[in-house]
Image (cartoon, rainbow, N blue to C red):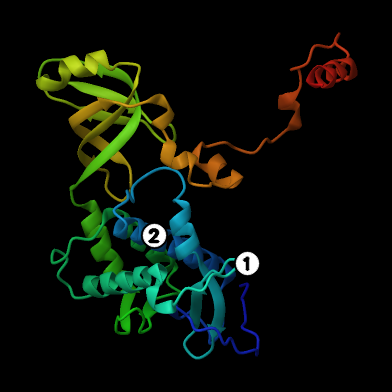
Amino acid sequence: MATLHKSKQITREKPILQLKVRGPGIRSGHIPVSDLIKICEELQKTVNRQAESMQGKKTLHPGPIVDSIRRECTLELIGIKKGTTSLQFALAKTQMTLPMPEQTSFGADVIGELAATIKSLGNGDISSQEINAGVLQGLYQLGGVIEDKHISQIEWIAPKMNGRRRSTGLLNEAIRERVATRLSSPRKAKIQFDGVLDMADFKPGDKRCRIDPALGASVMCSFDDRHAAKIQSLLRTPVRATGEATLKPYTDRIELLHIEEIERLPSLSLGEGNFFAGSSIAELAAAQNVKPLKSISVLAGGFPDDLDVDKFLEDIYSNRK
């Protein structure tokens, strides 16, 4: 089992979050690399979704997060402590650090809010608090590391910061089951969805249409008679639909969107949020489901055999002058 061991050098930077990992397969100051990678990846996704929720943004969406959340909420692993194996995280700093008091950090607020959410899930009353569906999905995925049984629990510790008291929450199998119960229950959410209105069925009593977004999967929609004429006039055009969505259990995908309002959307606005998100090449490839080439031979045959490539390139460069 591959392990990562903390060096003797003491990390002086104050952590914004500690995760204490316990279980029969965890030794003091050690953690399997596979578990560490999964914890870090799912932790960052959960933090991003909590940040989106607190800013009033959609947490259930395809594509990357916005740049502002990436700048303020990206975490760095700064230490692994002995005793109970403790993963210590700080907010990532840019190369050019701007003076920003710790007490005003949005990232600290996000960490504290997540600690309060996990703590509320531990009180046993699963209906006492409305928790954002995207945040629930993130916590469920983060708790997936417990499935292998060599990790039994993860203690979430947010230190005193931003006027908040020190807060702790425990993520274990019982808490994950409570999250699953919420996710598996019928979930409704008010959403706004942009895309091209590509299909409509005007069958009496069961009117349906389909909206294809710039990125991600198509969404099936239902609508009432009062919207029939407008939907017919908007076919094959970019639209913005607003209404109540039924969300599939355990996923962030929309099963059905019941349209309450629909309007024409300027084509340049379609996918505008994703366009300005500052996505990396890897994120764009993942969002558009672009796979790496398995063989360079698939690119063969695109250039005629009887055409001189050098002459072709020479013509291009000469025309640019």
Looking at the image, which residue is at 22% across and 35% down?
A: 242
- As displayed, is residue 236 above or below residue 28? above
Choose the circle earlier in sequence order: 2 or 1: 1
**211 relative position to 296: left or right:** left
Query: What residue occupies the far top of the structure in this picture?
Result: 306
Foreground residue, 115 or 152?
A: 115
| Point 50% across, 84% down: residue | 14
Q: In this view, does 231 lie above or below 75?
A: above
User: Answer yes or no: do the residues labelled 2 and 1 have beta carbons within 8 Å?
Assistant: no
Residue 109: quadrant of the picture: bottom left
Binning the other alpha carbons within 10 Å of mark 2 as few (below 14), some (14 to 19) or many (20 upward) gives many
Q: Position of residue 97 (x, y in %)?
A: 57, 70
Residue 64 vs residue 135, the one in the foreground: 64
Q: Name the residue under label 2.
A: 141
Depicted 227 relative to depicted 45: above or below: above
Q: In which quarter of the image is residue 269?
A: top left
Residue shown at 30% from the left, 66% from the top: 176
Q: Is residue 10 left or right of residue 69?
A: right
Please tell me whether mark 2 sits on a helix, a strand or a loop: helix
Q: Is residue 117 left or right of residue 85?
A: left
**Mark 1, residue position:** 95
